[in-house]
Image: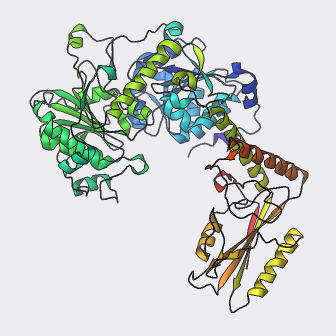
């Protein structure tokens, strides 16, 4: 059972964390810096050089891509420099490190090793639980120990992914006094910046050549060095030509254990049009590569699939159908193995001294080295993985049909790029002109554009603090306004959270039947009068449509509601939902629900009543909230006209005649309330 480090922090003296206001007032407080290099250009070498040159006995915490392959690759490279006694691996797989090497599965185990060994590098997979909870808790604990006097330096590999996904946690660690420096490493850094943010708005880019003596690789094979091969068929013609069975083969269904039995024909949740991908792969293999690839000679080919593992195995099947004796290596969360018609021969888990992916490829094909070799997969191919070395050489062919992915994901998928600075003259002469097959030209164009951008950052923009506008060369005219809107939303959310701790909510449910309408509505009026000390206003009362049904709203549009609709809403209701907060502490909202939406005679009146404690603090918060709403409305104005915006708040009826004013109301998505003081239902 893991140890809860946060509880151990109680009653421990600590220096206060740096606040965001300190950062705004003093840019020298910012500790973050970026090292930008193209894919496979030596970011890990730069990181290790930085670690080994440190004379301060720092503890280096290194977040790697959240895959065991990436973890092992970095671990093996550090092991050569640091030795096993200086290196601690913190992940879920003890078998991923060699005998005699230090491994921790939980944070308490990691703490014990850190306190009893002179660890210089803690290698951590960037799982959300590690980067958001366990490492911040560990740092707080270490920061409170008087006998722990070492600085901490944090290194974030693939920073373009793990900083945006965990920005609040990175800020948290950045603001801890024990953390002296955070370095992000990336080949596609655009998303790391946030305009006008005190930390991420203006960041320092390291001039690696000037500051570390490591020159930009001149012997580098980039996107611009590939030979672009377009597809002669359009997407529609390609799909028609391939004539794929829409059903996923039963063999593959058994391998992936999915309930989805068909190939996707549209990019649902970014998963991609699988029919288009597979049709493209089938066409390229059958119509083009069949005449170019010698089945009795080694050649090297890269065909990344999509997210779903079924596409990995289907591509492997397609390759073997065309080249039965080929080596097909599948890399995903299930396998790093050689795919055969009836089995997958995985890389041996006990062979832990071979950690480099390219060396694993060599091992897997050792029995048939004179055969065409193909690599497929997706997530495990996307970042941090090196598939090219002197023995294997570079790829002959690359097939990509990934136009639905963002430019940074597409560029990171370019595992066919490589740095050959250390290669011998003999192997240099064997470098091939990789043929880059794309269904859509935009795929290669975006990768090429990102390569140009990254090279420009390295050569012309490093050694300085830079904004996103500077590195992209694009000025966003709405950047400042959007930043102010984000701050406005955040402050309103914080106010709602604090108000929610004093809020009580009561739901009244009043059935109407057998013609007792007037009696029931009289009860509603009396309940409202007691709650608000005034009569109910016309705007609060639900109105009937032409068919005699009362219409009311749970969202932006009035409609005939069923009692089931209201009950479902009530289950997830937040204290401020559908209330227009103003300078008062009592709020009411009326709904009418029907058991039978074809019969207007019998219905149920629902009344939600919310009460805030009438304290001075509550009134101050309500006043500030009112000011923020007006500012937000002004930010949404364009030349004096109100913009239609997703930030529009719920758009429903106001709570009563006086509370609506002319302001919009707060959306449920902005109602971030962790708890409600009390909630009850009165029938």
The spot of residue 615 in percent (x, y) is 89, 54
Residue placed most toward the observer, 468 or 630 = 630
Q: Relative to 236, is 554 on the left or the right?
A: right
Q: On screen, 368 above or below 605?
A: above
The residue shown at (22%, 31%) is 301
Q: Which of 497 and 269 is in front in this view?
A: 269
Quarter of the image with the C terminus is bottom right
Q: How is the image coloured?
A: rainbow
| In front of the other: 172 or 13 | 172
Residue 445 is drawn in which quadrant?
top left
Give residue 392's position: percent from left, percent from top: 23, 23
The foreground one among 242 and 542 is 542
Q: In the shown orientation, is residue 301 left or right of residue 204? A: left
Q: Can residue 19 be seen in this view?
A: no
Q: In this view, does 306 lie above or below 673?
A: above
Q: Dividing the picture into quarters, in which one does residue 153 lie?
A: top right
Can residue 546 be seen here? The reply is yes
Query: x%, y% of residue 76?
Result: 39, 24
- Place residue 430 in its image quadrant: top left
Residue drawn at 34 percent across, 28 percent down:
355
Left-right relation of 683 to 173: right
């Amino acid at each position: 059972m893991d140890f809860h480090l946060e509880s151990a922090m109680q009653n421990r003296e600590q220096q206060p964390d740096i606040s965001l206001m300190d950062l705004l007032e003093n840019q020298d407080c910012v500790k973050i810096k970026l090292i930008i290099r193209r894919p496979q250009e030596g970011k890990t070498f730069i990181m290790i050089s930085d670690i080994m040159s440190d004379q301060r006995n720092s503890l280096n915490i290194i977040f790697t891509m959240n895959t065991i392959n990436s973890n092992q690759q970095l671990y093996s490279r550090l092991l050569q420099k640091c030795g096993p006694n200086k290196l601690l691996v913190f992940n879920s797989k003890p078998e991923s490190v060699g005998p005699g090497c230090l491994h921790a599965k939980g944070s308490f185990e990691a703490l014990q090793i850190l306190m009893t060994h002179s660890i210089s590098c803690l290698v951590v997979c960037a799982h959300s639980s590690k980067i958001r909870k366990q490492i911040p808790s560990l740092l707080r604990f270490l920061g409170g120990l008087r006998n722990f006097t070492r600085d901490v330096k944090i290194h974030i590999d693939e920073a373009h992914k793990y900083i945006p996904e965990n920005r609040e946690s990175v800020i948290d660690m950045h603001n801890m006094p024990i953390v002296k420096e955070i370095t992000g490493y990336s080949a596609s850094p655009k998303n790391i910046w946030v305009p006008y943010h005190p930390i991420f708005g203006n960041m320092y880019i390291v001039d690696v050549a000037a500051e570390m003596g490591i020159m930009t690789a001149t012997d580098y094979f980039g996107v611009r060095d590939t030979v672009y091969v377009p597809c002669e068929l359009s997407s529609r013609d390609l799909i028609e030509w391939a004539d794929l069975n829409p059903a996923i083969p039963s063999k593959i269904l058994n391998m992936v254990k999915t309930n989805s039995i068909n190939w996707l024909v549209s990019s649902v949740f970014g998963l991609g049009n699988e029919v288009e991908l597979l049709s493209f792969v089938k066409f390229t293999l059958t119509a083009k590569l069949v005449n170019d690839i010698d089945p009795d000679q080694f050649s090297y080919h890269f065909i990344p699939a999509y997210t779903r593992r079924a596409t990995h195995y289907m591509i492997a099947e397609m390759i073997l159908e065309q080249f039965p004796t080929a080596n097909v290596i599948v890399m995903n969360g299930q396998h790093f193995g050689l795919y055969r018609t009836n089995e997958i021969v995985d890389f041996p888990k006990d062979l832990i001294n071979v950690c480099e992916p390219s060396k694993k490829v060599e091992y897997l094909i050792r029995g048939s080295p004179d055969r065409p070799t193909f690599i497929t997969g997706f997530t495990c191919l996307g970042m941090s993985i090196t598939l090219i070395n002197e023995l294997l050489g570079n790829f002959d062919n690359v097939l990509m049909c990934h136009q639905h992915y963002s430019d940074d994901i597409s560029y990171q998928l370019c595992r066919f790029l490589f740095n050959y600075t250390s290669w011998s003259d003999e192997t240099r002469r064997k470098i091939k002109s990789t043929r880059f097959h794309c269904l859509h030209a935009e795929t290669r164009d975006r990768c090429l554009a990102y390569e140009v951008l990254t090279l420009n950052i390295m050569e012309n923009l490093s050694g300085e603090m830079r904004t996103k506008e500077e590195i992209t060369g694009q000025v966003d005219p709405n950047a400042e306004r959007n930043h102010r809107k984000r701050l406005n939303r955040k402050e309103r959310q914080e106010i709602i959270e604090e108000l929610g701790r004093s809020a009580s909510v009561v739901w009244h449910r009043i059935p109407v039947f057998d013609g007792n309408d007037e009696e029931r509505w009289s009860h509603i009026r009396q309940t409202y009068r007691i709650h608000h000390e005034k009569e109910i206003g016309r705007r609060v009362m639900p109105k009937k449509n032409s068919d005699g049904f009362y219409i009311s709203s749970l969202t932006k549009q009035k409609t005939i509601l069923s009692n089931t609709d209201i009950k479902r809403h009530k289950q997830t209701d937040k204290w401020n939902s559908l209330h227009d907060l103003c300078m008062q502490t009592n709020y009411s909202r009326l709904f009418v629900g029907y058991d039978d939406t074809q019969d207007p005679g019998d219905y149920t009146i629902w009344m939600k009543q919310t009460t805030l404690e009438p304290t001075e603090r509550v009134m101050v918060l309500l006043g500030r909230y009112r000011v923020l709403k007006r500012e937000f409305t002004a930010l949404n104005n364009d030349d004096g006209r109100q913009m239609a915006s997703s930030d529009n708040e719920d758009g429903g009826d106001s709570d009563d005649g006086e509370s609506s004013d002319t302001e919009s109301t707060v959306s449920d998505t902005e109602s971030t309330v962790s708890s409600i003081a009390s909630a009850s239902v009165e029938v």
